[in-house]
Image: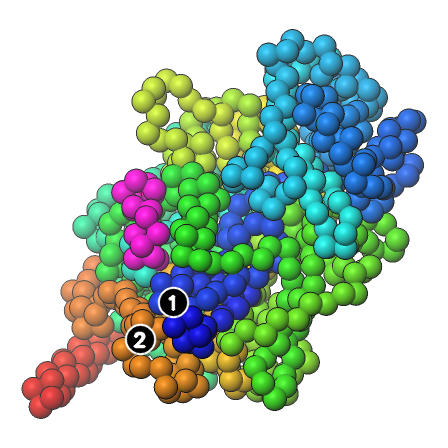
C-alpha cells in the first residue's frame, strides 16, 4: 500500500510566494498533490505582502565614529554581515538574554534613523546631537527598568520566521535633548546561513505594505479562497463606500474635500453629481462616458481596437476637458496608470464588473496584510502539508530527457554576503542582488513546476531555453513600472483626516492615500481615543520618480503632501516611517496593446506552467482577482498534464477533482446601450452646459481655428449619436434572439 501511495505521489514546485503562487499551492494541496513553495525572500505575499524594514549594518568607513566599528567587530565582520564564529554569536545571544543590548547595535540604529530623517528632509535641531552615537546609549542606559524591554521570541512567534535566535527590543520615553517621548522598537535575529556561517539581522517592528490594498465585490474567486482559508469577509475586512477628493490649500481640510459615494452605483448618481468634485455637467458626462465605454465592444486582436482610455474618451462627441480628466482619479486608484497609457479594453472590463456589483464600493483588510491575511493563510497551507523553502532563488531550469530540473541558490539573509564593488549592500527589503561569493547551486527535480514570478524574473529563469518556448518570448514586451509607497507614521492624529481613500487633486506626483490607523481600528469602542495617523501614500505618476534615489523620492513625496496637510517635522514618527520604491517588484501595467503579449498558463515545455496577474485569463485586469484566477488556472493545467502523463490513475481520483473558477457578473451590453439611449438628451444638454461654462472661463478657446474645427466635428458626431445608439440596440436585440434560438435548439 505504501508503494502504491508513493507511486502516485505527484510533486509540484511552486516558485513565488505571491497570491498567485499561494492560490495554486492551495488548490493542489487540497487535491492531494505534494507541493513545495520556493520564495526568494523571507516573507510571503509578493506585491500584496507586508514586511519589516531592515536596518543595515554596513556603512562607509569614514562614517564610523571613533570606537564604534571596533565595538561591532568584536562580534561580526561588518562588511560581510556575518559573525566571526559561533562563539561570537553565542556571546551576543547570552548578552541579549540578560537584557543587555551591545552598543554597536544602538549605533547601527542611530545611523539608520539619521538616514531616514535625511530622506524625509526633517530639520529638527534637537536631533543633531545624534552625531554623537554614545548620546543614544547613555539615554537608553538611564531609562527606568520598566521602560526597557528585551524579549526573546520563540520558534512559534510569527516574526522573523526561520531565525535561529530572535529578540524584540523596545525602549519607551527615551530622552535625547528635547525629545521627551521617543520610542525605539526593533528586532534582532541570528540566522543560519547556507554557507555554514551565522548572519545578524536588525529590523524595525512595523509591517510595511507594498501599497494600500482595495478588494472589490466582483473578486468572486478571491472571496471564495478567503472563505476556504477561514477569513470571513464580514470580520477580516471592512467595507468602504467613500472616496474623498482633496484640494491643496491652507483652509480647513473639510472645506477642501469633496466626497463621492459608491462609484458605479447609479442610484447614488444625484449625490455624486452634487459632491462638488467637478461641475455637475462634467460629472454627468463622466458617468455617461462609463456607460458608453461598457456598451462598446473591443477586440484586442484587431489593431484598430488597441486604444488607450484617453484616446477612446477624447474621440466621443460629448468629450469635455474635465469629464475626460476625471477618469484619471478613478484609474489612479484602480491601476496607478495614466489614462493615456491604460488600455481601453481592460478599463472597460473593470468598469463593467464594478457597475454590476457596486455596493459596497470596496473592502479593506482589518489590519496589515501579513498579520491579517498571509500569516493565517500560511498556517492553513502548512496544515495541508505545504513545505515552504524561504530564502531560495530559482536561478534557472534545465532541460533533459526526463523531468525539468530546477537550479536553486540561497539568497536573501540566508545567502552568502551580497556585495557590490567589495562592499556590502544595505538591504532594506528590496530585491536582493546575486550572491557574489556563493557559487553553489542545488538541483531539484519535481514532476511539475509552476512559475508564479513577475515577468522580469520569468525572463531570467527561462533565458537558457527561450528558443524552445516561443510563447515566452513576448514576456519581455510586457510593460511594468516602478511604484513608490511611503508608509508615513505620525506621533499624533492629524486633524480632519477622513477614514476613506483620498485622491489629492493637483498633486505633483499623483498621490493617493489612506489612513491605516482608522482603516484598521475603526471598531475601537472608545471613539475619543484616536490613534496616531498612519498614512499609506502611493505615487501613481511613477514616471516622475523613476530613477530617483530614495532620498530624492521621499523628499518629493513629503513636499507634495505638505501642500494638502498641515504637519510639522516634529509630528513625523521617523522610527516607523519607510519608503518602498518596489524596484524588485515592478507593477505590470495594462498598457495599450499588451493583451496579445500576455502568456498563457501552459508553455511549450511539458510540465512547466505560469501564474501571475500578467498571464492571460478571463478577468483581464491586473488585480488581486486576476492573480487568484491565474493560480487556479495553473492548478487546472497541472491536473490536465497529469491526466495525459499518468492515464493509469483513475479519473475519479481526488487528484483530478474539479477546480471551480467563478466568473464575475458584468453589466450586459444591451442594458448599457439602453441606458445610453435614455440618457442621450441629458448628455447633449450637459455637454452644452459644460461648453458654456468653459467659454465663460476662457472665451479665447471658442474662437481659434483649431477650436472651431473641433466644435464642428463634435456637432457632426452628436448628430449621428442617436442613429448609432439605435443600431447598437438593434444589434444587441438580434444577438439576444439568436442566443435564445440557440439555447432552444440545444
Where in the figure is residue 181, as x and y percent of width and height?
A: 61, 15
Would you place residue 495 above or below residue 270 in this image?
Answer: above
Q: Quadrant of the N terminus?
A: bottom left
Q: Residue at x 73, y 14 (%)?
A: 141
Q: What range of the chain is rendered magenta?
A: 222-241
Q: Which mark is residue 164?
A: none
Q: Going by the picture, which residue comes out furthest to the left?
A: 744
Magenta segment main secondary structure: helix
Would you place residue 358 above or below residue 507 in this image?
Answer: below
Residue at image mark 1? 32
Residue at image mark 2? 653
- Does the magenta segment cover residue 360? no
On screen, residue 351 versus residue 705, left or right, reads left
Q: Nearer the viewer, residue 89 or 189?
A: 89
The secondary structure type at the circle numbered 1 is loop
On screen, residue 288 versus residue 54, left or right, reads left
Q: Residue at x 27, y 47 (%)?
A: 360
Q: Residue at x 91, y 36 (%)?
A: 62
Q: Residue at x 60, y 50 (%)?
A: 42
| Residue 528 in view, yes or no | yes
* Tag 2–tag 1 contact (CB < 8 Å): yes
On screen, residue 690 versus residue 612, left or right, reads left
Amino acid at each position: 500500500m505504501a508503494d502504491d501511495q508513493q507511486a502516485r505521489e505527484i510533486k509540484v514546485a511552486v516558485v513565488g510566494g505571491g497570491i498567485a503562487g499561494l492560490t495554486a499551492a492551495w488548490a493542489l494541496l487540497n487535491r492531494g498533490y505534494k507541493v513545495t513553495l520556493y520564495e526568494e525572500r523571507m516573507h510571503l505575499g509578493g506585491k500584496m505582502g507586508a514586511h519589516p524594514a531592515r536596518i543595515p549594518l554596513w556603512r562607509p568607513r569614514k562614517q564610523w565614529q571613533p570606537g564604534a566599528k571596533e565595538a561591532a567587530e568584536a562580534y561580526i565582520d561588518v562588511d560581510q554581515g556575518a559573525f566571526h564564529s559561533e562563539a561570537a554569536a553565542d556571546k551576543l545571544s547570552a548578552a541579549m538574554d540578560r537584557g543587555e543590548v551591545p552598543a554597536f547595535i544602538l549605533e547601527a540604529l542611530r545611523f539608520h534613523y539619521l538616514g531616514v530623517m535625511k530622506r524625509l528632509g526633517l530639520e529638527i535641531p534637537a536631533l543633531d546631537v545624534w552625531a554623537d552615537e554614545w548620546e543614544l546609549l547613555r539615554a537608553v542606559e538611564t531609562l527606568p527598568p520598566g521602560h526597557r524591554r528585551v524579549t526573546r521570541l520563540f520558534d512559534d512567534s510569527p516574526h522573523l520566521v526561520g531565525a535561529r535566535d530572535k529578540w524584540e527590543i523596545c525602549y519607551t520615553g527615551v530622552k535625547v535633548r528635547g525629545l521627551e517621548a521617543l520610542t525605539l522598537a526593533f528586532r534582532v535575529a541570528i540566522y543560519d546561513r547556507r554557507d555554514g556561517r551565522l548572519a545578524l539581522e536588525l529590523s524595525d517592528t512595523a509591517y510595511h505594505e507594498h501599497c494600500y490594498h482595495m478588494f472589490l465585490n466582483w473578486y468572486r474567486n478571491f472571496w471564495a479562497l478567503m472563505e476556504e482559508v477561514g477569513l470571513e469577509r464580514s470580520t477580516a475586512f471592512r467595507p468602504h463606500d467613500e472616496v474623498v477628493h482633496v484640494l491643496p490649500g491652507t483652509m480647513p481640510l473639510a472645506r477642501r474635500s469633496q466626497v463621492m459615494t459608491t462609484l458605479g452605483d447609479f442610484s447614488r448618481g444625484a449625490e455624486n453629481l452634487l459632491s462638488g468634485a467637478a461641475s455637475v455637467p462634467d460629472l454627468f458626462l463622466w458617468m455617461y462616458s462609463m456607460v458608453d465605454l461598457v456598451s462598446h465592444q473591443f477586440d484586442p486582436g484587431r489593431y484598430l481596437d488597441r486604444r488607450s482610455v484617453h484616446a477612446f474618451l477624447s474621440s466621443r462627441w460629448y468629450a469635455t476637458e474635465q469629464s475626460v480628466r476625471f477618469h484619471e482619479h478613478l484609474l489612479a486608484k484602480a491601476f496607478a496608470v495614466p489614462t493615456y497609457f491604460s488600455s481601453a479594453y481592460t478599463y472597460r472590463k473593470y468598469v463593467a464588473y464594478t457597475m454590476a456589483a457596486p455596493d459596497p464600493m470596496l473592502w479593506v483588510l482589518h489590519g496589515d496584510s501579513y498579520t491579517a491575511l498571509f500569516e493565517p493563510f500560511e498556517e492553513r497551507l502548512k496544515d495541508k502539508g505545504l513545505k515552504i523553502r524561504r530564502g531560495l532563488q530559482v536561478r534557472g531550469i534545465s532541460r533533459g530527457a526526463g523531468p525539468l530540473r530546477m537550479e536553486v541558490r540561497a539568497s536573501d539573509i540566508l545567502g552568502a554576503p551580497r556585495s557590490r564593488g567589495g562592499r556590502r549592500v544595505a538591504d532594506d527589503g528590496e530585491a536582493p542582488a546575486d550572491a557574489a561569493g556563493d557559487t553553489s547551486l542545488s538541483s531539484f527535480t519535481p514532476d511539475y513546476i509552476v512559475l508564479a514570478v513577475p515577468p522580469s524574473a520569468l525572463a531570467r529563469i527561462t533565458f537558457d531555453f527561450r528558443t524552445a518556448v516561443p510563447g515566452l518570448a513576448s514576456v519581455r514586451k510586457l510593460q511594468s513600472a516602478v511604484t513608490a509607497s511611503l508608509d508615513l507614521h505620525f506621533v499624533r492624529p492629524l486633524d480632519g483626516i477622513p477614514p476613506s481613500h483620498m485622491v489629492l487633486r493637483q498633486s505633483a506626483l499623483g498621490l493617493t492615500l489612506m489612513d491605516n490607523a482608522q482603516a484598521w481600528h475603526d471598531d475601537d469602542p472608545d471613539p475619543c481615543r484616536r490613534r496616531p495617523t498612519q498614512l499609506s501614500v502611493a505615487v501613481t505618476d511613477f514616471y516622475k520618480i523613476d530613477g530617483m534615489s530614495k532620498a530624492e523620492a521621499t523628499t518629493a513625496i513629503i513636499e507634495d503632501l505638505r501642500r494638502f496637510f498641515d504637519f510639522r517635522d516634529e509630528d513625523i514618527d521617523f522610527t516607523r516611517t519607510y519608503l518602498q520604491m518596489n524596484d524588485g517588484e515592478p507593477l505590470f501595467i495594462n498598457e495599450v496593446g499588451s493583451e496579445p503579449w500576455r502568456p498563457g498558463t501552459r508553455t511549450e515545455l511539458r510540465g512547466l506552467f505560469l501564474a501571475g496577474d500578467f498571464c492571460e485569463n478571463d478577468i483581464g485586469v491586473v488585480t488581486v482577482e486576476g492573480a487568484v484566477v491565474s493560480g487556479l488556472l495553473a492548478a487546472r493545467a497541472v491536473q490536465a498534464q497529469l491526466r495525459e502523463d499518468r492515464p493509469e490513475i483513475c479519473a475519479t481520483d481526488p487528484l483530478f477533482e474539479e477546480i471551480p473558477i467563478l466568473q464575475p457578473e458584468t453589466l450586459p451590453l444591451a442594458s448599457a446601450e439602453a441606458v445610453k439611449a435614455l440618457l442621450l438628451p441629458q448628455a447633449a444638454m450637459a455637454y452644452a452646459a459644460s461648453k458654456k461654462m468653459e467659454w465663460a472661463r476662457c472665451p479665447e478657446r471658442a474662437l481659434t481655428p483649431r477650436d472651431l474645427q473641433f466644435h464642428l466635428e463634435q456637432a457632426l458626431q452628436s448628430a449621428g449619436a442617436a442613429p448609432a445608439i439605435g443600431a447598437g440596440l438593434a444589434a444587441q436585440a438580434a444577438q439576444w434572439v439568436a442566443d435564445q434560438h440557440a439555447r432552444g435548439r440545444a
